[in-house]
Image: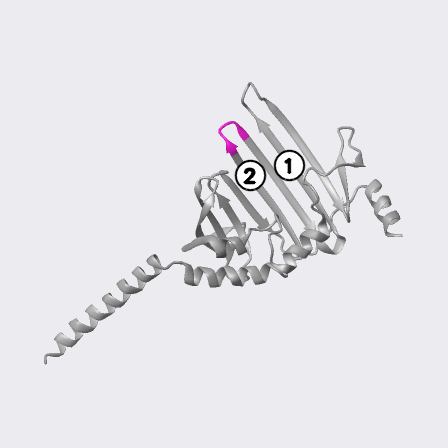
Amino acid sequence: MDSRYWLWLGARLVVAIVIVGWAASYLFPGGNGEKEFQRSLDAMKQVRAVRVATIADATATQHIEMSWDLVCSQDAFHYKWHLVESDPDKAADINQEEIHVGTTSYEHRPDDSWKPGISSIGSTNPSGVCKMLAQGTDSRVLPDLATMIKRGIIQKGDKKTVNGVRCREWNVTIKGGPSRLEHDTVCLGLDDHLPYESTVDWQHARTTYSDYNASFHLELPAALQSASATSGN
């Protein structure tokens, strides 16, 4: 046969393979996504320090900003929460700032002092968070990838840069969310597989993650340093 026929046939075969591959990735999106999320989950087990920042507009009138600075070597984290409610009937501007050292939480008071208080985030403590990270269970600080692997439909997105780090965005549809289907995204580092950004549609929330295992320490106010030293003795 004419060689042009074989070239034509080969070209059609290549096109067919590409189409089948694309269709398979669309119809069965979980394969590679699940593997990549498992790599990320394994990488997260090694996290011992991280900074987390979240901005959310839970409702049309409610704006929330939240941050965590976690340092497992200090058995401590610094937590901030700021809520602004613009509805005239429920207007509010609330700030909450806590430092947790060991099993004790210290609240930042209006007079700029730090005093032991009741945690606004329940029984969460630094060692507990660090233990959950090491075990790969939901730490409330990093994305709950185990649940996404178990219940989510994962589809590959585009590469992007978040705070100077190249990552690939993954789109996750989770069944049984507050709106029946919850649509999230997670951007995983191309080199280290760690999450650098996540979004949650029903909360209109965006979270960024930085300074993984960086050699930073929380600056504890003098009163906390004394209390921490006393409890250590």
* Residue 85 position in % (x across, y down): 57, 26
Question: Dot 1, how many residues are within 10 Å of its Cα: few (below 14), some (14-19), or many (20+)?
Answer: some
> How many numbered marks, from 0 up?
2
Residue marked by disc 1: 81
Query: Which residue is depicted at the point 46% across and 60% down?
Result: 34
Query: Which residue is depicted at the point 76% across and 31% down?
Result: 109
Specify the farthest residue to the top: 89
Please say if 90 is above or below 70.
Answer: above
Looking at the picture, tell me which residue is in the foreground, 156 or 103: 103
Q: Is residue 115 magenta?
A: no
At label 2, which amino acid type do we have? Ile
Does residue 54 appear in the picture of this structure? yes
| Lower position in the chain sequence, tag 1 or tag 2 | 2
Give the residues drawn in magenta, as a range. Answer: 58-62
Residue marked by disc 2: 55
Q: Is residue 147 left or right of residue 80?
A: left
Quadrant of the image containing the N terminus: bottom left
Helix, strand or loop for disc 1: strand
* Image-quadrant location for residue 117: top right
* Residue 83 position in % (x across, y down): 60, 31
Q: Is residue 181 left or right of residue 113?
A: left
Does residue 167 appear in the picture of this structure? no
At label 1, which amino acid type do we have? Trp
Name the main secondary structure of what is drawn in magenta. strand
